[in-house]
Amino acid sequence: MMAFWITASILLFLIVIASTFGPMVGLYGEMEYTSKKEGVGQDERFFG
Amino acid sequence: MSAFSVNILVILALGAIFIASSWYISKKVSTADDYISGNGKLGVAFGTTSLLAFWITGNTIMAAPEAAYGMGVIGAIAYSFLGGVAVVAFSPLGKRIHAIIPNGKTIGDFYKNRFDKKNYYFFLFMVFIYIFGLLMTQGIGGGLLLEQTFHIPYELAVVLTFLIVIIYASMGGFSSVTGIAFFQVMLIFVVVIVVPPIVYFNTGVAPIYEGIQKLAPEKLDLLLPSGILFMFAGAMMGIGEVFMDNTFWQRAYAVRKEKLMSIFSLAGIGWFFVPLATATLAFVAIGTDQAPEQVNQVAPYIAEIYGGEFVSWVFLVGVWSALASTIAAILNSLVSLILNDVYKSINPNADNKKLLKMAKVLTVVIGVLALLISLPKFLTMLQMLIFLGVINAAFVFPIIYGLFWKKLNADVSFWAAILAVIGGYIAYYTIGSLQGVVVSGWISFLVCWIGSLVKPANYDWEKLYRVGAVQEVTRK
């Protein structure tokens, strides 16, 4: 049973890390927002 | 002079320095925005140290050696990992927050505009429970720590700590809290940099290693199952705490945009070494077969044996600075939330002078309330943190997906948080405390992810971008 909880916690941790750092490699492809304001474009490039 | 009198004098002297510094800093605070979130130009030094000062609590210095004493090397690594990785993981979120809500003030600004009213009110309710609980853990934990380790009566320790913090935090708000944090972190680092080397110069490294091999070889096992579970379930708890905590959001808004990733990454990496360094003191206890009466006293116990009275006082200064800086940051974060998300809704036309006055009154009222609730000793710090960890884990995915993924549906987010809290607490009471955190995190993930794929939203980010600007225009 301990092995199950360890596996579940490691998997969940990896999902969180992939979800937070994923934008750097374009995980959420459709995340762009429509604003054309200054400075916005820079962040969009950063997050893919 | 007795050790008790000297310890009280040390705290009073430190408190006087913090209050005098706060008075000087508060002269530059003229608006309610300065009081609750600074001016948005916090640089690398003050940004990093203010994060470290909040995140290094009394627990970091005392409970990490306790984990190392119980689980050995993996306990020390796991404790350092769970807090450090959480701050590093927040760095991409911080950058995104700065980009899409450039004029935001609190996490409430995000919740109110990204989701709907039911999400906003449910989140506010849960976040108030969490922040107030955290404030109490620091008060209770701090009181116990000073009583057990430094012989200061519990009630006196709690009253002294809260009074000093209330005075200096109410003077200049966020500016005072972040300004003084710089000095507090320097004091904490003295403990980390000076104490373990002094102890190891006296004991030697090889004899300690050989002692552990002989007396408790299992403490050298890096694959100890309970240690691995503590490492990753604990990380989920730490990540949830950081993502949900307004203290981190305040700093995400307050620091310079171009320095944000480095500030959060540096703070996370810097934090990692603090518990790791103090935890090494527990190895001395294991290797020399010496045990204190209570296991949470293992670090100061070993420090006093091998470092003498001077090292003991250095420990007191470091631990008390950690407690004061954390309580001050939580207090300011809770006041910011109430002022920005509750008071401004009730009094939308309140001018700057009135808002500033209300912020100071709220700091005193909440501080005194937290002091009174912390006086009875009814829970230990770690129990309370894991209990609150179920709530923290429930909001991890609504926050991540809410910031990055326009498909996240407001209804899905609401149900994900509610079901995760319910499921998490069922597991907490029926299976185990850390398992409750894991169940809460999984429900939060699965409901948000599957729900948004089945019923995707198409959120317009422009709505978040306008948040602060709309507020500014309204107030002018």
Image (cartoon, coloured by chain):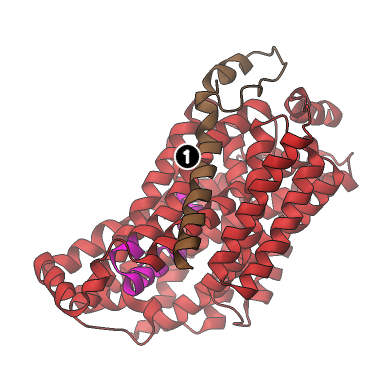
Q: Residue at x 62, y 48 (%)?
A: B396
Quarter occupied by residue B351: top right
Q: In which quarter of the image is the N terminus of chain B?
A: bottom left
Residue B17 showing in the rendered view: yes
Element type at mark 1: helix
Q: In this view, does B382 lie above or below B18?
A: below
Q: Residue at x 56, y 74 (%)?
A: B140
Dot 1 amino acid type: Phe
Q: Nearer the viewer, residue B246 or B406?
A: B406
User: Main structural element of the magenta stretch: helix, strand or loop?
Assistant: helix
Q: Which chain is the one coloured brown?
A: A
* Residue B250 image position (x, y, % from top left): 62, 42
The residue indicated by pointer 1 is B264
Q: Quadrant of the C terminus of chain B?
A: top right
Q: Which of B299 and A24 is in front in this view?
A: A24
Q: In this view, does B246 lie above or below A4?
A: above
Q: Which chain is the one coloured red?
A: B
Report the span colored magenta. B52-76
Q: Could you tell whether B327 is left or right of B129 in the image?
A: left
